[in-house]
Image (cartoon, coloured by chain):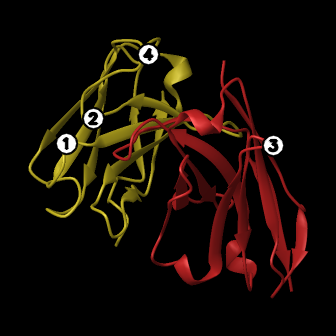
Amino acid sequence: QSALTQPPSASGSPGQSVTISCTGTSSDVGGYNYVSWYQQHPGKVPKVIIYDVSERPSGVPDRFSGSKSGNTASLTVSGLQAEDEADYYCSSYAGSNNPYVFGTGTKVTVL
Amino acid sequence: QVELQESGPGLVRASETPSLTCAVSGYSISSGYYWGWIRQPPGKGLEWIGSIYHSGSTYYNPSLKSRVSISVDKSKNEISLKLSSVTAADTAVYYCVRHGSWLGPFDIWGQGTMVTVSS
């Protein structure tokens, strides 16, 4: 099972929006509505910010939103803030044989 | 509040079989949920290693299955990971995680423990 494909980097100015893509196959992203997104600040532990494609855990700002179309999932961060500068990883359920696959990761920079 | 705390050997030699432990506090493993391990090599992405259900059923990443063993000690409220025949490629931060359902997400993470494999 190959890793999901994400762009290595993305950037935006404070207040702008940035969208990160996560491309898989019909065996993972396209086959299930179980895509999660994790935010990881440098030297810190990953934290789930989106699950089940578009659901936000309690306490996660609504500036973070998720969606999916076909084999590609997306994370949008609206109204960028300095604290949003971090690495973001997507993950998808991929069936019983190898159930969890992660994306390659995207570094978001706030200009 | 559920907390996970990993512990491990830190530095191991190639071909050894290190054992990592995750102590769970604030929740009894016997009560439910899935508990697993995810690793992250320095400067790289995340990789799911395997998970164990509170009943003891285990699930492993096929790419690591032949070298991985995950177990649960309900009396200590701990889960353990053993990784055999390690190489430099196994150098990583190893995170203990909880996932509320088989379908994810990984909603609680430990602080991680670094394992460095020396040749």
Residue B15 seen in the figure: yes
Q: Is residue A67 left or right of residue B70?
A: left
Helix, strand or loop at mark 3: loop
For the residues tagged 4 and 3, is the chain the same? no
The CA span between labels 2 and 3 is 32 Å
For disc 2, the marked residue is A52
- Asked if marks 2 and 1 touch (Cβ < 8 Å), the reply is yes
The quarter holding residue B114 reads bottom right
Label 1 vs label 3, nearer the camera: 3
Badge 3 sits on which subunit? B
Q: Position of residue A4 (x, y in %)?
A: 33, 60
Q: Colour of chain A?
A: yellow
Q: Position of residue B58 (x, y in %)?
A: 52, 62
- In the figure, the red chain has which letter? B
Bin the neighbour count of mark 3 within 10 Å (Cα to Cα): few under 14, some 14-19, many 20 and up: few
Q: Residue at x 69, y 38 (%)?
A: B110
Q: Position of residue A5 (x, y in %)?
A: 32, 59
Nearest to N terminus: mark 1 or mark 4: 1
For disc 3, the marked residue is B76
Helix, strand or loop at mark 4: loop
Badge 1 sits on which subunit? A
For disc 4, the marked residue is A60
Label 1 vs label 4, nearer the camera: 1
Nearest to N terminus: mark 2 or mark 1: 1
Residue type pointed to by label 3:
Lys
Q: Nearer the viewer, residue B72 or B98?
A: B72
Q: Is residue A11 left or right of residue B117?
A: left
